[in-house]
Image (cartoon, rainbow, N blue to C red):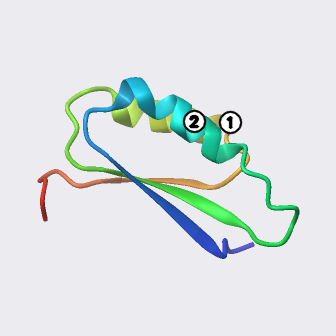
Amino acid sequence: MTPTISVILTTYNRASMLGDVLARLGRQQTDGRWTYEVVAADSGSSDHTRDVVREFQRTSPVPVQYVYEGRRGR
């Protein structure tokens, strides 16, 4: 099923906080009224942001996409 809402989460070197935010997004209750996906937009992080998102993708109850933008501010 194609999600009806995309939640876009932009991040830059916030891997230490990202896991909690993703977990909270994954627990959102929609009661079947709509579906959603999470798009993690990484603005060129140099920490382990990508790993945090990849780990969440493995267990997430909702679709998760990871987008890496190598240059900030574009």
| Residue 32 in picture, x, y percent from top left | 87, 66
Number of numbered tags placed on the structure image: 2
Q: Nearer the viewer, residue 16 or 2?
A: 16
| Residue 29 in picture, x, y percent from top left | 79, 53
> Most extreme residue toward the top, as rendered?
16
Q: Is residue 4 above or below residue 71?
A: below
Residue type (three-letter) at the residue carrying disc 1: Thr
Residue type (three-letter) at the residue carrying disc 2: Phe
Instruction: Tell me the quarter of the picture where residue 37 sits.
Output: bottom right
Mark 2, secondary structure of its residue: helix
Q: Left or right: where does residue 31 sit relative to residue 27?
A: right
Tell me the quarter of the image containing the N terminus. bottom right
| Residue 57 in picture, x, y percent from top left | 58, 41
Mark 2: give few (<14), some (14-19) or many (20+) Cα within 10 Å. some
CA separation in Å, label 2 and label 1: 6 Å
Q: Left or right: where does residue 27 sit relative to residue 63?
A: right
Q: Are marks 2 and 1 in contact (CB under 8 Å)?
A: yes
Mark 1, secondary structure of its residue: helix
Per the image, the residue denoted by label 1 is 59
Disc marking residue 56: 2
Q: Left or right: where does residue 19 sit relative to residue 63?
A: left
